[in-house]
Amino acid sequence: MHPDTARRSGIGDRDTVVVESPQGKVTGTALFWPAIRPDTIFVPNTFGPAQQVGDRFGDPRYEAANSLVDDAFYDNLSDQQAARAHRA
């Protein structure tokens, strides 16, 4: 996530954070990246705890974002599940 966005939310680099949607929640590690758009928070998809390559570099493991999407809805262009997140 963008460092400015994180600071406004009281999140520090490498803090544990929870991302929630009506379908579920995942816990992950906040990683600051100044090149990302400030209005975007990227949550990795699919790999989850099978992040063996990241282990070699000491990267934190993360839960996959798959549980945050609703399988009943798809984007017609990309054929991906729709993320129906809500704001707290």
Image (cartoon, helix red, strand yellow):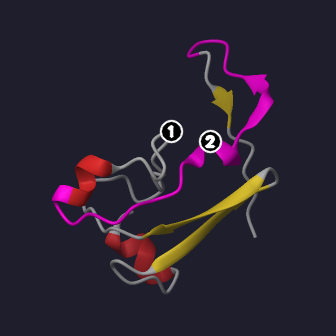
Q: Amino acid at mark 2?
A: Asn
Residue furthest to the left: 57
Residue 35 falls left or right of residue 8? left
Residue 51 falls left or right of residue 54? right
Please state the extent of the stretch shown in magenta in the rendering: 56-78
Query: Foreground residue, 48 or 82?
Result: 48
Q: Position of residue 29 (x, y in %)?
A: 42, 70
Residue on which the image places disc 2:
66
Q: Amino acid at mark 1?
A: Thr
Numbered disc 1: secondary structure? loop
Residue at image coords 35%, 65%: 2
Badge 1 crowding class, 10 Å Cα cut-off, few under 14, some 14 to 19, many 20 or more, is few
Residue at image coords 67%, 28%: 81
Residue 46 is marked as 1
Q: Is residue 75 above or below residue 82?
A: above
Q: Position of residue 30 (x, y in %)?
A: 41, 70
Q: Is residue 80 above or below residue 7?
A: above
CB under 8 Å between discs 1 and 2: yes
Is residue 73 found inside the magenta-colored segment of the image?
Answer: yes
Dot 1 or dot 2, earlier in sequence:
1
Residue at image coords 39%, 63%: 1
Is residue 59 found inside the magenta-colored segment of the image?
Answer: yes
Measure the C-alpha gap from mark 1 to mark 2. Answer: 6 Å
